[in-house]
């Protein structure tokens, strides 16, 4: 996306001088951490969001830091960068959307955008046309023997469907009494995928009676503007008034009458709307950015120099209120989300560790890869990209240390010692005693978790069977808000964590190689579980060619079925899978323990496999 010369940034230059001066002081760690963090959280960096220019300024700052330390470039083509493509912020509605109806007498009516219809944020940006057909709630759920498409020829037509689900089934329960099933079937992405699998040309969604009870509002475009298209067809919402006119003109029934009949009988009621056709265009503008992981290598010496330890942190954040912001005050929602703790703190910790090892002329042991990841906030994109396209031999990576939100060290309520959370302790049998031994000097109140899974970049490495340790000082009220500023950071606590990390890396650099141990994924309370098959997806939001399998859990359903790393899932249960949005919607309809057929693209060959989710 273009280079930014450091001379353009007066603040960056000032901080660079301050950092270089401080680096000569014996006790300069805190001043260096503060100087680096002050720049990364400055107006220049704009919250380091994918939709801002600030993320490129932050990347150049980190790259310059590595370069000034004399570290070897660890990116591609002899550079410090490894670039990849991702959606930059939310989609925007374009100016060219339209919806034109042709009626029984060949009369033509053009509906008004944002009054009578509106594209959905996850719609494909396309044009379509065809006869109209009403498909009830747009559900096909064989386990409940409920199929709104049964007996209908939908191919080449535009479907009108209702939001949510019918309230009862034949036994008076919601689809067998399973709220998870109901939630999955009510999903708009699930409805669109089902319509696309029936070869519909487009989907027109209408508020059901319950949704419209407080007013028949068109859903805000922004509600789904961060999501990828679940199918390659236009998806729009129209008002109940216009859906009602179409049903009455074609069938002599109101939309409310049809809904009540479905509710009363618990049976689908779908039908063609003879004589009516539609031409639609959903104009949705998506912008993509080429961002980069910033990578440097401190080459080791001795018999273990051919092995590597990755020391990483993500440097991206939420820009001016991108997806993930928890700010509820509308007057602050679009302010710069500075991300001092998340994850400026981890980024500057990695920079300080890089400085220490670069300055150690006597360093012996494994080579060190210092890495600042982009795209973590959008789904671990940067670390997953690196693990799929490693810049050092992946089998030679013996451990990964991830620093994410380490700027808020606070006293433990019982011991009053600084509480440091460390995840991934169970991924190598050597970790627990090693951490305890090192902590004799630092005296942290260590809160250990065994699992190598978690909502940060270490998970990408754990899935590759690399031992991981995840350093974290806990959530706080300023998380993902503009208030996460330098003023809230405990720099003395960060200095202690840097010291702990320094000694840990020194020990890992020369000790016997840690042996990876598979750990289980912790439960996620409060979230609707999707039946799992034991894969690590390799692409989120940046592909429409299927879901890449970048890792397969040993002994899991996918492994038992024969899925392999590098496979691309393109179909599940007869429905096309374009991306992770589609994958999650379709898998949400599957039942644990019930076999489901999957089709994968394996090096250009389509392979059918039967997987039993758990």
Image: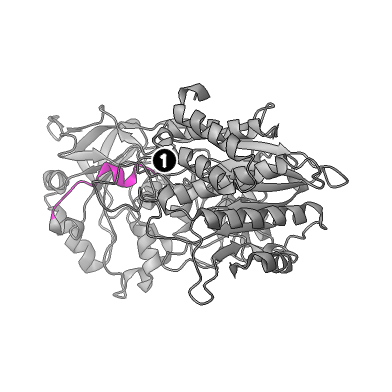
Give the position of the C terminus as an image quadrant.
Answer: bottom right
Q: Which residue lies at the image location 53% right of the left edge and 38% below the top edge?
A: 545
In the displayed structure image, the side of residue 539 where residue 161 appears, left or right: left
In the displayed structure image, the side of residue 149 where residue 82 appears, left or right: right
Q: Quadrant of residue 107?
A: top left
Q: Is residue 216 magenta?
A: yes
Q: Position of residue 560 (x, y in %)?
A: 67, 60
Q: Position of residue 4 (x, y in %)?
A: 50, 24
Q: Nearer the viewer, residue 21 or 433?
A: 21
Q: Which residues are magenta?
A: 215-229
Location of mark 1 (residue): 47
Q: Is residue 173 above or below residue 340?
A: below
Q: Which residue lies at the image location 46% right of the left edge and 22% below the top edge?
A: 8
Q: Quadrant of residue 477?
A: bottom left
Q: Tell me if I can see residue 607 in this picture.
A: no
In the displayed structure image, the side of residue 593 where residue 96 appears, left or right: left
Q: Which residue lies at the image location 66% right of the left edge and 42% below the top edge?
A: 354
Q: Position of residue 332 (x, y in %)?
A: 27, 46
Q: Is residue 593 above or below residue 52?
A: below
- Looking at the magenta stretch, what is its main secondary structure? loop
Q: Element type at marker 1? A: helix
Residue located farthest toward the right when viewing the structure as drawn:
303
Q: Is residue 1 magenta?
A: no
In the displayed structure image, the side of residue 387 where residue 234 appears, left or right: left
Dot 1: within a 10 Å radius of its alpha carbon, few (fewer than 14), some, or many (20 or more) residues?
A: many
């Amino acid at each position: 996306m273009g280079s930014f010369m450091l001379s353009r940034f007066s603040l960056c230059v000032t901080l660079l001088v301050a950092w270089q001066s401080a680096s000569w002081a014996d006790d300069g760690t805190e001043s260096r951490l503060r100087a680096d963090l002050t720049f990364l959280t400055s107006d220049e960096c704009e919250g380091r969001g994918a939709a801002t220019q600030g993320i490129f300024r932050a990347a150049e700052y980190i790259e310059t830091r590595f370069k000034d330390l004399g570290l070897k470039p660890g990116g591609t083509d002899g550079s410090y960068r490894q670039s990849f493509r991702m959606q930059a912020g939310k989609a925007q509605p374009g100016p060219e959307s339209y919806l034109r109806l042709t009626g029984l007498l060949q009369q033509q009516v053009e509906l008004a955008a944002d009054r009578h219809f509106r594209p959905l944020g996850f719609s494909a940006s396309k044009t379509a046309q065809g006869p109209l057909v009403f498909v009830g709630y747009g559900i096909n759920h064989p386990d409940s023997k409920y199929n709104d498409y049964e007996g209908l020829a939908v191919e080449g037509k535009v479907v009108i469907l209702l939001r949510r689900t019918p309230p009862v089934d034949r036994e008076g329960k919601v689809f067998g009494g399973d709220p998870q099933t109901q939630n999955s079937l009510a999903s708009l992405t699930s409805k669109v995928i089902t319509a696309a699998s029936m070869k519909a040309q487009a989907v027109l969604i209408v508020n059901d009676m319950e949704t419209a009870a407080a007013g028949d509002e068109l859903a805000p475009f922004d509600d789904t503007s961060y999501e990828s298209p679940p199918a390659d067809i236009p998806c729009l919402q129209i008002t109940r008034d216009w859906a009602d006119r179409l049903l009455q003109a074609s069938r002599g029934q109101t939309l409310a009458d049809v809904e009540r009949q479905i509710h009363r009988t618990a049976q689908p009621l779908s039908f063609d709307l003879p004589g009516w056709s539609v031409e639609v265009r959903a104009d949705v503008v998506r912008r993509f950015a080429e961002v980069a992981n910033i990578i440097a290598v401190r080459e080791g010496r001795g018999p273990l120099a051919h092995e590597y330890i990755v020391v990483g942190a993500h440097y991206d954040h939420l820009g001016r209120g991108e997806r993930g912001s928890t700010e509820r005050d509308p007057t602050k929602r679009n302010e710069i989300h500075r991300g001092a703790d998340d994850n400026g703190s981890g980024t500057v910790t990695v920079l300080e560790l890089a400085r220490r090892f670069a300055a150690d002329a006597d360093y012996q042991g494994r080579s060190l890869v210092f890495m600042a990841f982009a795209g973590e906030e959008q789904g671990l994109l940067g670390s997953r990209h690196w693990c799929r396209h490693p810049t050092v031999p992946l089998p030679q990576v013996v451990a990964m240390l991830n620093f994410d939100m380490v700027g808020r060290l606070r006293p433990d309520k019982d011991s009053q010692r600084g509480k440091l959370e460390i995840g991934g302790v169970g991924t190598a049998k050597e970790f627990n005693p090693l951490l305890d031994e090192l902590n004799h000097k630092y005296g942290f109140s260590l809160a250990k978790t065994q699992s190598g899974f978690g909502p940060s970049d270490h998970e990408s490495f754990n899935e590759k069977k690399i031992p991981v340790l995840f350093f974290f000082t806990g959530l706080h009220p300023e998380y993902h808000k503009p208030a996460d500023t330098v003023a809230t950071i405990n720099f003395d606590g960060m200095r202690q964590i840097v010291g702990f990390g320094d000694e840990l890396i020194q020990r890992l650099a020369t000790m016997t190689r840690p042996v990876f141990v598979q750990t289980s994924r912790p439960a996620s309370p409060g979230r609707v579980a999707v039946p799992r098959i034991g894969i690590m997806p390799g692409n989120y939001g940046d592909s429409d060619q299927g879901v890449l399998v970048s890792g397969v859990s040993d002994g899991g359903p996918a492994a038992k079925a024969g899925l392999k790393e590098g496979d691309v899932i393109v179909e599940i249960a007869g429905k096309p899978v374009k991306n992770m949005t589609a994958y999650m919607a379709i898998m949400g309809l599957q039942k644990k323990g019930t076999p489901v057929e999957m089709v994968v693209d394996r090096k250009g060959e389509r392979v059918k496999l039967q997987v039993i989710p758990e």
